[in-house]
Amino acid sequence: MKISVTVLNAVLAVALASLSGCAAFRGSVRATDPSKAPAITARYDQADLLTWGQVAAEALLSHPFPPAGESQPILVDMGIQNRTSTHIDTKAITDTITTKLMDSGKVRLANATRRDDLLKEQGYQLANCTEQTRVQIGKQLGAKYMLTGSLVEISQQSPRQVRVSKQEDVYYQLTVEITDLETGLVVVRKQPDRMRTATRPIIGW
Amino acid sequence: MRHLVQRASSQRITDQWSLIALASALAALALVSGCATSRLRDARASFYAGRFDAAVGELQDIPAGNTDRILFLMERGTARQAGGDFAGSIADWLEAARIVEDLDYVSVSRGASSLVANERVQAFRGAPYERTLLHAFAAKSYLALGQWDDAAVEARAIAKSLESLDGYPDDPYSRYVAGFCFEMIGDGDGAALEYRQAGALAPALRIEEDTGRILPAAAATNTAAATNTAADAATAGAAGAPGAELVCFVLMGRAPAADESADGTAEWEAAPYAEILVNGRVLGRSYPLGDTGRLLAATERRRAALSAVKTGARIAVKGTIAHQIAEQNRALGGLAWLVLFALETPDDRRWATLPRYMQVARVPCPSDLTEYTLVFRGPGNAEIGRTTVAVPLSRRGRTCVSYCRAL
């Protein structure tokens, strides 16, 4: 029985394709360490959330905060303002920071639901209340300190020119500050930041 | 002799198969080249008939990988916003903006297909002004929900998309929306910058950088602005009065359709405007900041040269293919010629539910404002229509924010 070379080659090609391609065409799920997962874009991701939470909390506590002599003062979280061009859940950042501050055992945290109720009573949401209202609500909650902040972004893209890939630099700066509600003075301010560059091809299939 | 007959017969069979294969390939090409989908057409018809839920229903399931996916999302977002589903409209427009970013590359396969079919096989990304308006409209939905920080995020996206226009038209309306969003979060510098740029693009108006107030320029030549002196006086007279203020984004008419000139639709011709009434008293009027007809015309002018080159190249490629086939088989070549040139249709995909005129009214109002009436006026101050608006009407401090779409 003769098998033509063409048929043999075709069978071989199909077999090779099956062997090499099966993994590529199969879906898979695997657990990944969120802090070690490689970044896919230059934009905000889970690594930023975890890093900033950690860095900001450590920086605040090492200031030193709270000052010596104050035993577990109450801190109220009044939100971090998103001043970027991306819809970022900044509440997740404050939650991460406040969780780490609480874990340190050095501060107590005012209840966020109670805070929101008080804001609602006065016709506000956390995102749109004024500085005065924040201070007033903080005092009503019995807090000694208020945590606020902002997240800013500066991004740049490579200009139009003959090239095969596009480069984007994205810089984020997170400012976190703690204000003494009695004196109105900012007692701690920290600014973790990061810059990331991503390139992507401008020609694709 | 028998051998020759067999060869001729075999040749006929091969030709038939070639014919079928070519016809199938060309039919497939015709299908993927994106004939105007009836769903989009039906949805737009429902939208302009005021049946917003029906329009959303028509666009409920967007086929994965559809080249018009962004267009579907643009249209569905508009229908959702008009129907009061602000969160839904935001979701659609953010998704559209995300895909626009993902598609920011040159597709070799679609580029090659477009050379033998038409531009419609390329994924629709929208004209630059449409991409900017995605953010401006999303910002208004956030404003309607009172999510000021999120509206400001969209304002930054507007500013970013207007950064490097590369010859495409700038949009004073989007700039004003961005300025207002910045103003709402207390970013006075950002607001002033956008108001200044909006003012520079609308020379018939004077936009105050520090307040965002709009008045006709001293030497305004705008006919509509000059004729409505009563409303102007009302606005100017109450300008310095302390109290609440209503900022209303007024959208009128419909964007020029594919088969229409960019110069206007009959019903909303000659830059109409809207008067704002509360309890029968005129509080002021709207002023024109954007016109999608002009934006489209300027965009087409910018694209004209590139479009002509691409069309020329495509015709050359199609001619070559048909000629090559005709050399092998005259009938097949004729068919190929017919099909390839039948595919030669212009790419007229547009965000068709956009308004024609985009205006802003910024007037003093009662602090307990719960609703207001808009009276739309056309040439000679003739009333075109009127509507009472209670939703959306959000407020921050003394500023009430609302918008209205007149179809």
Image (cartoon, coloured by chain):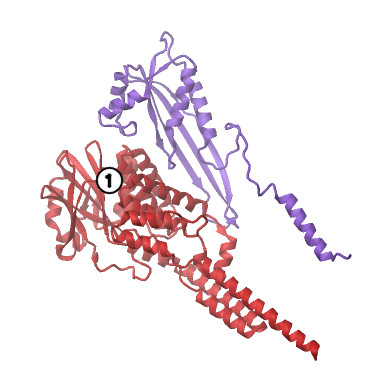
Task: Give the side of residue B45 with respect to residue B120, left or right.
Answer: left
What color is chain B drawn in?
red
Q: Position of residue A40 (x, y in %)?
A: 57, 42
Tell which residue pokes out farthest to the right in this image: A1
Determine crowd level at label 1: few under 14, some 14-19, many 20+ residues with C-alpha closer than 10 A: many
- A131 or A13: nearer the viewer: A13
Q: How many marks?
A: 1
Q: Do we see residue B118 in this rendering?
A: yes
Q: Residue at x 47, y 72 (%)?
A: B345
Identify residue for label 1. B209
- A180 or A6: nearer the viewer: A6
User: Which quadrant of the rendered structure holds the N terminus of chain B?
Assistant: bottom right
Tell which residue pokes out farthest to the front in this image: A1
What color is chain A drawn in?
purple
Tell which residue pokes out farthest to the bottom in this image: B1
Q: Position of residue B74 (x, y in %)?
A: 40, 55
Please identify the quarter of the rendering in which residue B72 is found: bottom left
Q: Residue at x 20, y 42 (%)?
A: B245
Task: Give the side of residue B19 with respect to residue A90, left or right.
Answer: right
Q: Position of residue B62 (x, y in %)?
A: 46, 55
- B406 or A173: nearer the viewer: B406
User: Which quadrant of the rendered structure holds the C terminus of chain B?
Assistant: bottom left
Give above or below for A33 relative to A108: below
Residue type at numbered disc 1: Glu
Q: Chain of mark 1?
A: B
Tell which residue pokes out farthest to the top in this image: A69
Q: Position of residue A110 (x, y in %)?
A: 37, 20
Q: Do we see residue B291 in this rendering?
A: no
Task: Give the side of residue B184 with respect to residue B300, left or right.
Answer: left
